[in-house]
């Protein structure tokens, strides 16, 4: 069974870079046609798709976040990571990693991690 686990600091200061890692177990991030995603949910709001990295390393980003977002992977550790630069308090949210097969595959989710942007 594929399991995902987010890790990273829970508090980030404004203007700094938020860095999170998703560790995948029970399956490989290079499995063909699988897509691995970052999604967040600000308090009182809906889910927001931030970006994704495919099994072959190709990345996709939300247009609204593209200038501040970078998604990468470490295949040796079976992890993929999110970096969000120049954070503001409005970036406070629960951040989730998720994955599945194809563009509509959201079979697997991490439990989510709270990140607060505050000085």
Image (cartoon, rainbow, N blue to C red):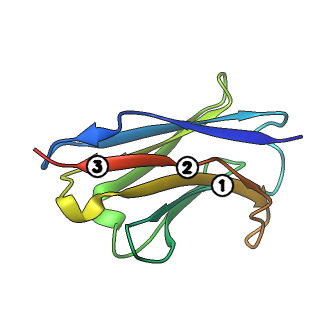
For discs 2 and 1, the disc positioned in front in the rendered view: 2
Tag 2 residue? 112
Instruction: State the residue at coordinates (30%, 58%).
Output: 92
- Label for residue 116? 3
SS at mark 2 in the image: loop
Q: Which residue is drawn at 38% across and 67% down?
A: 42
- Screen quadrant of the N terminus: top right
Q: Which of marks 1 and 3 is nearer the N terminus?
A: 1
Q: Residues within 10 Å of mark 1 (few under 14, many from 20)?
A: many
Residue behind mark 1: 98
Looking at the picture, how far across and down is residue 39, in whole percent? 52, 62
Q: Give the CA distance from mark 1 to mark 3.
A: 20 Å
Q: How crowded is mark 3: few (under 14 residues within 10 Å), some or many (20 or more)?
A: many
In this picture, is 118 found above or below 63?
above
- Residue 35 visible here: no
Horizontal and vertical percent position of residue 37? 60, 57
């Amino acid at each position: 069974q594929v399991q995902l686990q987010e890790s990273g600091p829970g508090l980030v200061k404004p203007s700094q870079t938020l860095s999170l890692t998703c560790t995948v177990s029970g399956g490989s991030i290079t499995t063909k046609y699988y897509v691995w995603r970052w999604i967040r949910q600000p308090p009182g709001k809906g889910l927001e798709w931030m970006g994704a990295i495919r099994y072959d390393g190709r990345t996709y980003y939300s247009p609204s976040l593209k200038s501040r977002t970078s998604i990468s992977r470490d295949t040796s550790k079976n992890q993929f990571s999110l970096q969000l630069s120049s954070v503001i308090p409005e970036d406070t949210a629960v951040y989730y990693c998720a994955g599945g097969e194809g563009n509509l595959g959201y079979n697997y989710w991490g439990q989510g991690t709270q990140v607060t942007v505050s000085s």
